[in-house]
């Protein structure tokens, strides 16, 4: 009996020792695996930062290239600046090589190549001294066409420096959308200057249903008052020869930069603010339902055209305070209804409040497609910057790698 008990004790001691050895071996494996996991995490962290910085550099360089006003050296410098600014601490765990920037102007393409090396820690035990990985980010300017209507406030409060600032900002935006050199943006731009009414110019008879007459029009009444129905019986624009008329006429969509700049240079300020009328005409200029009104070269694309961006830039320096059809509601209420309906059709609405005051700022922020589509400007420099931001946001770029 005693002999059997001794055998059991020896077996227990042998088993305990075996478990200890096994546990020790497993601990070594677990520690090594944890170390390798740390090294892998360091590699993924470094690569994620490198990819983010390369993408930012490609986006910025692609935008600079699409503007058509920069040399290859300048585009390359833009890429380098954005890469450096977006690296953050992505190089904490390793070394990053110099970026290579390849520019293909004919295709509107920028390619960024860069590589990094992350030294290993515990993974060195398995013979891995470092991990090298390359990153490529490529961007091309989209082939989507842009239809942009500029709805510009030319009311009396815009007199003096303000109208001058507007002319400069609008001209610069036209230059951005229709560059002389580089890859063309496939954009068409329209103008809808407004005050107490909109000057329909040579389109007056068509939009009012009259056989004679010239001059300005105001809002529609009836079921079409907040829609973009083509002008027809029951949907004609309102007209009264006694309503004050801005001198600047509407300009349908065009690629003729000279024409746009000439009309912008002639903008003058007078009258009250019927902003809803300008809003409506901005929509009409990009609406396919108004194609029968405009010349062939100015006809808007269909709403469901996947390769077309339709946009309206709505700008004012004050509250919408004038309306002509009382049954429609006040000017601000009409503008909100029009903005909601055009956005429902896929039209992107940008809004710029130029030293406009709280009520106008609230209205424009509601009209804009999103907070990112709304801008405030306190002076001419701010207005110019806001218009440039609109133009750049319409440069539709996408990553291809």
Image (cartoon, rainbow, N blue to C red):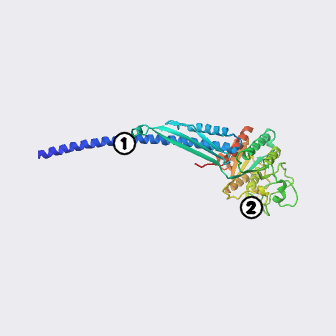
Secondary structure beneath dot 1 equals helix
Residue tagged by mark 1? 30
Visible residue check, residue 115: yes
Give the distance between the C-alpha atoms of the residues marked 2 and 1, in whole angstroms.
74 Å
Secondary structure beneath dot 2 equals helix
Q: Is residue 2 left or right of residue 297?
A: left
Task: Please give the name of the residue rendered at 23% of the width and 44% of the height, measured from the top-left corner.
Answer: 15
| In front of the other: 233 or 328 | 233
Residue 208, placed above or below residue 170: below
| In front of the other: 231 or 178 | 178
Residue 223 locus on image (x, y percent): 74, 61
Residue 230, placed above or below residue 173: below
Q: Quadrant of residue 18?
A: top left
Residue tagged by mark 2? 223
Residue furthest to the bottom in view is 233
Visible residue check, residue 329: no
**Around disc 1, counting alpha carbons within 10 Å, would you say few (fewer than 14), some (14 to 19), or many (20 or more)?**
few
| In front of the other: 282 or 43 | 43
Mark 2 or 1: the one toward you: 1
């Amino acid at each position: 009996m005693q002999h059997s008990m001794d055998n059991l004790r020896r077996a227990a001691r042998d088993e305990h020792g075996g478990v200890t050895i096994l546990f020790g071996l497993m601990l070594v494996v677990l520690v090594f695996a944890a170390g390798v996991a740390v090294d892998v995490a360091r590699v993924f962290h470094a690569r994620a930062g490198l990819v983010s910085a390369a993408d930012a550099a490609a986006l910025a360089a692609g935008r600079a290239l699409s503007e058509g006003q920069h040399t290859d050296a300048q585009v390359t410098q833009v890429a380098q600046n954005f890469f450096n600014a977006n690296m953050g601490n992505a190089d904490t765990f390793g070394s990053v090589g110099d970026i290579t920037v390849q520019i293909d102007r004919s295709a509107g393409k920028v390619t960024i190549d860069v590589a990094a090396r992350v030294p290993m820690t515990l993974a060195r035990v398995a013979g891995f001294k470092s991990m090298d990985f390359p990153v490529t980010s490529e961007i091309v300017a989209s082939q989507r066409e842009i239809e942009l209507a500029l709805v510009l406030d030319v009311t009396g409060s815009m007199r003096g420096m303000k109208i001058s600032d507007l002319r400069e900002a609008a001209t610069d935006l036209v230059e951005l959308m229709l560059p002389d050199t580089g890859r063309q943006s496939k954009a068409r731009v329209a103008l809808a200057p407004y005050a107490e009414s909109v000057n329909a110019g040579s389109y007056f008879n068509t939009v009012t249903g009259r056989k004679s007459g010239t001059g300005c029009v105001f809002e529609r009444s009836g079921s079409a008052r907040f829609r973009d129905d083509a002008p027809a019986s029951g949907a004609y624009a309102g007209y009264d020869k006694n309503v004050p008329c801005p001198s600047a006429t509407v300009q349908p969509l065009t690629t003729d930069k000279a024409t746009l700049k000439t009309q912008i240079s002639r903008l003058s300020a007078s009258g009250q603010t019927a902003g809803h009328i300008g809003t409506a005409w901005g929509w009409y200029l990009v609406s396919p339902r108004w194609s029968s009104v405009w010349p062939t070269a100015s006809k808007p694309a269909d709403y469901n055209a996947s390769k077309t961006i339709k946009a309206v830039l709505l700008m004012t320096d004050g509250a919408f305070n004038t309306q002509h059809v009382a049954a429609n509601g006040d000017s601000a209420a009409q503008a909100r209804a029009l903005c909601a309906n055009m956005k429902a059709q896929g039209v992107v609405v940008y809004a710029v409040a130029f030293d406009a005051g709280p009520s106008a700022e609230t209205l424009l922020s509601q009209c804009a497609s999103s907070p990112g589509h709304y801008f405030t400007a306190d002076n001419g420099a701010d207005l110019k910057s806001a218009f440039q931001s609109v133009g750049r946001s319409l440069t539709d770029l996408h990553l291809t790698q």
